[in-house]
Image (spheres, rainbow, N blue to C red):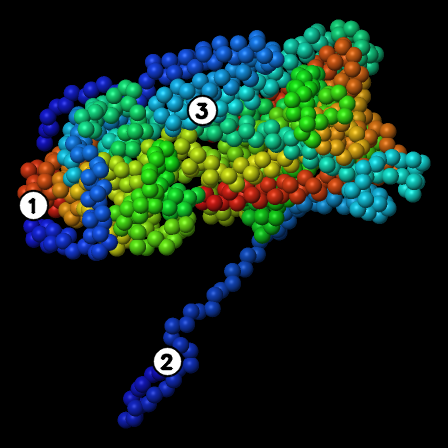
Amino acid sequence: METNGIETNTNQRVERDNSTARATTRSTDFEEKMVATTGLQTKAIHAWFGDHHVLEDVSLDFPANTVTGLIGPSGCGKSTFLRMLNRMHEFLAGASMAGEVFLDGNEIYAPDTDVAAVRLKIGMVFQKPNPFPSMTIAENVLAGLKLANLKVSNKDDLLEECLVRAGLWKEVKDRLKLSGSSLSGGQQQRLCIARALAVKPKVLLMDEPCSALDPGSTLKIEDTIHELSSSMTVVIVTHNMQQAARVSDHCAFFLSDGHPGRVVEFGKTEVMFTSPKDQRTADYVQGRFG
Amino acid sequence: MVRTVWHGGTLMTSVLSEPALASPPRREIVDRRSLGDRIFRKGVTLGALTAFIVLSLIASLLFFRGFQIFSAFGLDFITTSTWEDVDGTVENAKFGVAAMLVGSIVVATIAMAVAFPFVVSSALFLEFYVPHKLKAVLVAILDLMAAIPSIIYGLWGYLVLMPLASGWAASINNYLGWFPIFGVDFDNFEASPFVSGLVLALMVLPIAMSVTREVYSRAPLDQIQAAYALGGSRWGAIRTVVIPFGRSGLVGGMLLGMGRALGETVAVLLTLNLVFEVKFQILASAGGSVASLIASRFGEASPLELKALMAAGLVLFLLTLIVNFGASTIVARAERRVK
Amino acid sequence: MTNIEVKIPERQRPWINRGASVRELVVPVAIAAVVAAAINLLTGLAGALGFYFAFVLSYAVVAWFTGRRHDKVKGIDKLATAFITLGFATAFIPWASILFTVVRRGWPTIYGGYFTTDMRVTAADDDLAMGGLSHALVGTVLMLLVASVISIPLGILTAAYITEIRGKLSGFVRIMVQSMSGVPSIVAGLFIYATVVSRFKFSGLAGALALSILMLPTIARTAEEVLKLVPEEIRSASYALGASQMATTFRIILPAARSGLVTASMLGVARVAGETAPLILTSFYSAVFSLKMIGEPIGSLPMYTYQNFGVGTETALTRAWGGALVLMVLILILFSTARLLSGRGQK
């Protein structure tokens, strides 16, 4: 039954391999340097592509240092919503929106907002791994620093720290000078995670990061997500319900059904999977559709 | 494969020769086309080979007509600069295209050097900066610019640009004259490689720009988004993703432009003073170009000089062939990389 | 299942800040203009071009400063934007100048009889109200026609080989076409001179042959792209009906690509309409209106312009600009027609 399934999963989470355990110890220093996060909130978010209304009235609260999963059938606006959180939605032609997004109390769509600064605080990992092929592994990880012209006292330490947290250090520490695209798919995605971490974001958005990867890499990334959640807020879009159950503390269930996508239910993951309030949520998590 | 069978009370084993899982021999599909189609195919193939036939004819004809010159002068034809037909005999004549060859390359190089920043900035502007609605209009205008014939560039170059450019050349000489290529022997700045190069830069800009723009438009969108998601600015994303990606396409486009510049005749003819001496003073009123040599000497050429012009034509033909071939290979490789 | 009715708010684009972006544009432009004017007056950088040059530099610096107020990255971003935008704009200035000059200086030659008289009795230096370019116009048109008749079928055949027959030599043919497009126009003229003119003297036919060498690659390449656009299903349907390859190509494929092929042809013609160098060696020059393509030289617009330029007097130069103007209009018509046809074909 589901309850047992989740309990087993929680037990499994206790076992982690050394690299991530080491990362946890290291990240305490990191943690101390970071300002306490207050999290991300959205109020009445709507999204349009041209005249097509794709998201309706999404108001969610992402508490600090938690992992929130966005689940639901494909095409109901989860990725669109995610892209609104770091102001990438506006790149698409004909995009418009309504509502507000708050990071630490600041509305990120306010006029005169420094968009690049917002994106430094809210990082993103994409579905298809996209390391920069013209850069080495090391350069890829530190690319964000170069783009934002951030000065760091010790680049090598940061490099190692990010790769360790992403669970990639052991595999690449001897070949940091190789091109970023010489790695396997799973490794590339972990490289992208390390790259996102290098600019010390407060929130990490992940758009189906494991959907194109093998189970081994998926597991490693899920471990990383768990470790990251102790110091930042993670929002992850996923199609894989088991993954959502393994990885997230809270879940938001999106549904569109012909009308614009809405959040049907939001709550703690255990509750969503064992005793959801809405019948549609129950149908989805039990696999009756989607 | 072994088969075991009861046969009259005894167990018999027999080995069957062919293995049971061998794939059968493949049938050859013979295509016997109708007579009409066979003629059609041969006809089309012949038509398609026109390009090859014409190119071979050009090469062989120029070689054949200029043979006397090649055999008389050998490599000297390419390494010496004197050009005179004294009395119609090969023994006393002197033909060498070195000055013109070097001159062609100098002018083409100036053209590419001047055009380069504009090629890159225009390609980037049209792909990443231009407001959506203006793009189609501007591209159409650019296509039109590519169609302006060289005689008009030559006319404008001589009558409008040259007075201005001589002024600029004079200033450059004023401030930077100590630098060898900017020095001059005489104070005449008209009809110099500099002016020719400027006109040629204008002429090759559209083709180089369109090739480069094509490559930039294929820069992987997901990496550009990744750059933005990391907090990069528009220039940051371009610098990190687009420019490394488009490097070989840019080189190919510039080489294609160079090929065109090397073969350009009339625009150079009207804006460059031909002097039979290898010169690197780009501001001085003296230079060379193989194409203009042929056009300008053709009218009054003696039969012997005509042969020399044929030989020069062959040299030019081979040079542009090599440059263009290199350019298209690079561009093809760049485009293949995207797939 | 009814959901709570949500009032749909107004669509917004908060990332577009018209007021700020206008302000961001106007202020640096204004400052740069003032600085440039100052530089213009005070230093040797005189004249309109000097002002423009100074303006570009000042604008770049001002843009960088405005960005720098935020942070270094914004400064560099604004600097890059300034240079890229201005680089593009600068490239337009010479072309605008060319178009402007051609029209301004060529216009005085146009009068009632311009297109119907030739130069047989008029000297280049005579009054502009005498003489015209009928001979040049007809010569160009005739040569382009003959060249089209030669190279359009050959170009389409070349393209058809690659897209329909798909023979083993397809790669080779493409390379040959590519190489042929790089042949300098003077070399094409030299070739035709060595073969045709040396035997048959200057003629319009020789000129047309030289032009067709230059036209063929353009037509072949564009036709190939056009034929590739014909959907594969149409070919399959035709072959499945039992049609021969010849029938399929001529009755189905080529008609399907008709407008695209016309565009390809017109582009090829537009490209060679203004070629001068090959004509110097093949059709040479004539001042007389004639329809004779063989045995004697024929006039053409580029050569008309070139000859008058050679004469060099003020009136002759104006005639040259007049020839240039007519040539430009001709090319413009060809180009626009080609574009219109290709646009309509896509719908």
Residue at 40% x, 24% y is C75
Residue A157 as seen in the image, left or right of residue A241: right
Asked if the residue at tag 1 contacts the one at tag 3, i.e. Cβ–Cβ closer than 8 Å, the answer is no
Q: Which residue is mark 1?
A: A274
* Residue type of the residue flagged with mark 3: Leu
Mark 1, Cα crowd under 10 Å, few <14 / some 14-19 / many 20+, is some
**Number of the front mark, 2 or 1:** 1
Provide residue A276's location: percent of width, then percent of height: 7, 40
Q: Which residue is mark 2?
A: B1
Provide residue B103's location: percent of width, then percent of height: 73, 33
* Residue type of the residue flagged with mark 2: Met
> Residue B148 is drawn in which quadrant?
top right
Q: Between residues C200 and B223, which one lies in front from this camera angle?
A: B223
Q: CA distance from mark 3 to mark 1?
A: 57 Å
Q: Residue furthest front?
A: A153
User: Mark 1 falls on what kind of element?
Assistant: helix
